[in-house]
Image (cartoon, helix red, strand yellow):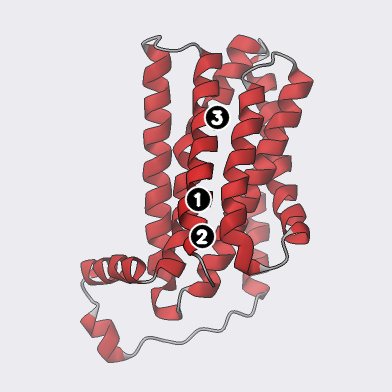
Amino acid sequence: VLNSASYLLSGWFIYLAEIPQSEMSAAERHRTRNPLTGILEGFRFLQENRQVLRPALAKGTFTICSGALVYMLIIVAEEILLMGSIGLGLLYAARGVGTGVGPIFARRLFRSESGWVQVMGYCMVFSGICYFFVGQTSSLIWMLIFVMLAHMASGANWVMSTVLLQRRAPDVFRGRSFSTEWLLFTLSQSLSVTIASLILEFGWLTLQEAIGVYAVLLCGIGAFWLLKVAPEDTI
């Protein structure tokens, strides 16, 4: 019921917003009547416009590891905190608070959008460091703090990449850019959670070891982003 109410509130805000839009011509609608036409053109557009591709990859790149880390919080609540659904609720509440306030702090700290692609890399590294400490402690208080900090970075990455994608993609390709971004995000998250669950199911790593490995990997991905992806973003 609460979730439903939040959707109604969101819908009301969107209804009140003034969103300028231009309609597609009849000829263009006819040309793109086959959905595959639009999908393929969207992929080609992203390949040819790297300034749009970079923010479109940010969420999927982040969730390669964060998807598994968030999933493992469920098991942390059961096996480490021994608190079941109450522990999970507290961990997810900390995650929610971090996701909510992170973008606000990031906007205050990093006002120039030209540096946001680089900031996304720092967010990955910072989140990885925080989750590494989550895997090293059994204290509820410290876990809540580190989960909140990790998702402050995650929320900042999410909002910055969304805003850049909105600003950089032209109207005709904006929807396709976002759908491609979400496709990559969903695939990354699914693979991340599946691999982590197999690792734990077959006992290849303990829960705390798995959290540590994914956290270090997230730091490595963030470092790669800073060294290879961010320097090419000159906008």
Q: Mark 1 sits on what residue?
A: 227
- Distance Cα–Cα, label 3 vs label 2: 24 Å
Looking at the rendered structure, the kind of residue marked 1 is: Leu
Tell me residue 76's x, y (percent): 60, 18
Q: Are marks 1 and 2 in contact (CB under 8 Å)?
A: yes
Q: Which mark is residue 21?
A: none
- Work out whether residue 102 or residue 54 is closer to the camera in this orientation and state it: 54
Q: Residue at x 52, y 57 (%)?
A: 230
- Distance Cα–Cα, label 3 vs label 1: 19 Å
Looking at the rendered structure, the kind of residue marked 3 is: Ala
Tell me residue 130's x, y (percent): 66, 31
Looking at the rendered structure, the kind of residue marked 2 is: Pro
Other-residue count near label 2 (Cα within 10 Å), few / some / many at <14 / 14–19 / ≥20: few
* Location of the C terminus (image quadrant): bottom right
Residue 141 in sight in this render:
yes
Q: Earlier in the sequence, mark 3 or mark 2?
A: 3
- Work out whether residue 46 or residue 92 is closer to the camera in this orientation and state it: 46
Which element is circle 1 on?
A: helix
Q: Residue at x 50, y 37 (%)?
A: 220
Q: Depth-wise, is mark 3 or mark 1 nearer the camera?
A: 1
Q: Mark 3 sits on what residue?
A: 215
Tell me residue 59's x, y (percent): 49, 50
Q: Residue at x 68, y 20 (%)?
A: 87
Q: Mark 2 sits on what residue?
A: 231
